[in-house]
Amino acid sequence: MTPEENEDSPSTGNADPRDNDNAVRHEREEHSVSEATRLSARLIYEVVRRDGEEELRRPLTSLSFSGTAAGILMGLSVLSEAILRTYLPDRPSSFLLENFGYSMGFIVVIFGRMQLFTENTITTVLPVIARPERECITDMLRLWSIVLAANVLGTMIAAAFLSQTTVISPEVKTAVVELSRHAVHMPADESFLRGLPAGMIVAAIVWMMPSAQGNAFFIVLTFTWLIAVGDFTHIIAGSVEMFYLLMIAETGLREAVFGFFLPVLAGNVLGGTAIFTLLAWGQVRNEVKHGTGSGRHG
């Protein structure tokens, strides 16, 4: 081979270093664009659906313990809000700040991957919509029943701790009573209507989490704060307040069950399932059916 031919032939030793730099830069740019673009609705649906499929396969014991822990920790929402109400200055604007306490229980439960009934009204419904078979529907109803019962048991334990121990100061207990009276003593129809947006908000949190891209904490904090500041009713957080009033004899069992628990439960399920889930499904139904749709879009 002549020297001229040797110079013209491709060789890694003679490669222009700028080509490698350009390749690396291009790869970094592609990665940045990929990270910056949003997940498509179809991919969000698939993430939530797969999460629901996994939840439907979890054993009874895991669901029970996780659901009970979630119910207990939801007591933090009531306790934190009561503490802020007690110690914040008595101003109209304090209402906006004290309701951030309501988010505390949701933050622990959601990021701790515990079983919260209102989350399951979307995650486990999407597999049923995609695969409407008797076995899948039965599994969904089984999970709902177990998680709801476990959540309620946990809220009962939390209410007992708040009401029957001396750990909580009298001033904070007074605030808990005020919060509980306001939540539980609404008319049944109002409790139901106020449960609709609460169910939709929790379902919206579930839908947004796959594309949160580092903003998950902000999403959970602000949207659960919206439930409190909007005076909406949530069946699990509200059950802590319901049991609290029952344990201090501030309400009767009939009023608690028929005036609060069942109307709020129906509102949350309808808001989270029949409204939000069907709307979420509607925007991806054709893409899922035909297997189309890009993974990401700008």
Image: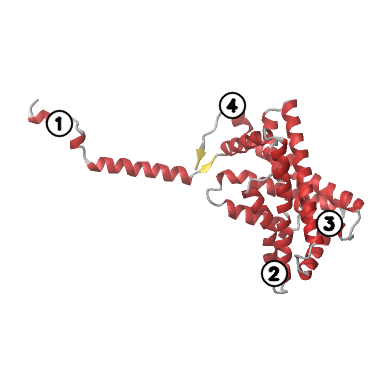
Q: Nearer the viewer, residue 168 or 221?
A: 168
Residue 92: x percent and y percent? 72, 71
Provide the residue designation for mark 1.
8
Q: Nearer the viewer, residue 235 or 149?
A: 149
Q: Which mark is residue 184?
A: 3
Q: CA distance from mark 4 to mark 1?
A: 51 Å
Q: Locate the N terminus and report the quarter of the image it occupies.
A: top left
**Amino acid at the residue labelled 1:** Asp
Q: Residue at x 21, y 34 (%)?
A: 12
Provide the residue designation for mark 4.
290
**Which element carries disc 3, helix, strand or loop?**
helix
Q: Earlier in the sequence, mark 3 or mark 1?
A: 1
Q: Tags 3 and 2 in contact by the CB under 8 Å rule?
A: no
Residue 52: x percent and y percent? 66, 36
Q: Tags 2 and 4 in contact by the CB under 8 Å rule?
A: no
Q: CA distance from mark 1 to mark 2?
A: 77 Å
Q: Earlier in the sequence, mark 4 or mark 1?
A: 1
Q: CA distance from mark 3 to mark 2?
A: 22 Å
Provide the residue designation for mark 2.
94
Q: Earlier in the sequence, mark 2 or mark 4?
A: 2
Q: Tags 3 and 1 in contact by the CB under 8 Å rule?
A: no
Q: Is residue 246 above or below residue 272?
A: below
**Which element carries disc 2, helix, strand or loop?**
helix
**Which element carries disc 4, helix, strand or loop?**
helix
Q: CA distance from mark 2 to mark 4?
A: 52 Å
Q: Is residue 266 left or right of residue 56?
A: right
Q: Nearer the viewer, residue 111 or 263?
A: 111
Q: Nearer the viewer, residue 283 or 123?
A: 123
Q: Which corner quadrant of the image does residue 142 belong to?
A: top right
Q: Tags 3 and 4 in contact by the CB under 8 Å rule?
A: no
Q: Tags 4 and 1 in contact by the CB under 8 Å rule?
A: no
Q: Earlier in the sequence, mark 3 or mark 2?
A: 2
